[in-house]
Amino acid sequence: MELHDKHFFNNTEVDIDKVVDYIQQHPQDMMTVLSYVIERVQHFKEFEDKKDFEKRMYDHRIQELNAEYMEEE
């Protein structure tokens, strides 16, 4: 059984209906599917956290550069 994000996700959001439908059709794979979904959600969360951190750092740097520019005028 090969699982793909398209089976259970809309972009980075879990489509719980797809998960439930798949498990109902393949009850023997329930633990594998749930483990896969949990792992992917954690991956997406880490990616979002990293993206948010980089945005904050970028915004902070822009503020610093703006302050430096204002001092020079």
Image: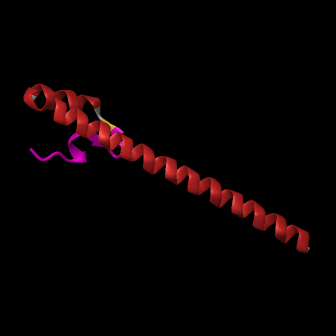
- Horizontal and vertical percent position of residue 53: 57, 52
Q: Is residue 9 magenta?
A: yes
Residue at 17% x, 45% y is: 3
- Horizontal and vertical percent position of residue 44: 39, 46
- The answer to whether 10 is drawn above or below residue 54 in the figure is above
Q: How many labels sit on residues?
A: 0
Residue at 77% x, 63% y is: 64
- Horizontal and vertical percent position of residue 57: 64, 57
- The answer to whether 28 is drawn above or below residue 53 in the figure is above
Location of the N terminus by quadrant is top left
Find the residue positioned furthest to the bottom: 72
**On the image, which quarter does residue 69 sit in?**
bottom right
Is 65 on the left or on the right of 72, as rendered? left
**On the image, which quarter does residue 38 sit in?**
top left
Residue at 20% x, 27% y is: 20
- Horizontal and vertical percent position of residue 43: 37, 46
Q: Is residue 5 magenta?
A: yes
Please give the range of residues in magenta: 1-13
Seen from the viewer's position, the closer of residues 63 and 31 is 31
**On the image, which quarter does residue 60 sit in?**
bottom right
Location of the C terminus by quadrant is bottom right
- The answer to whether 3 is drawn above or below residue 15 in the figure is below
The coloring applied to the image is secondary structure
Seen from the viewer's position, the closer of residues 69 and 10 is 69
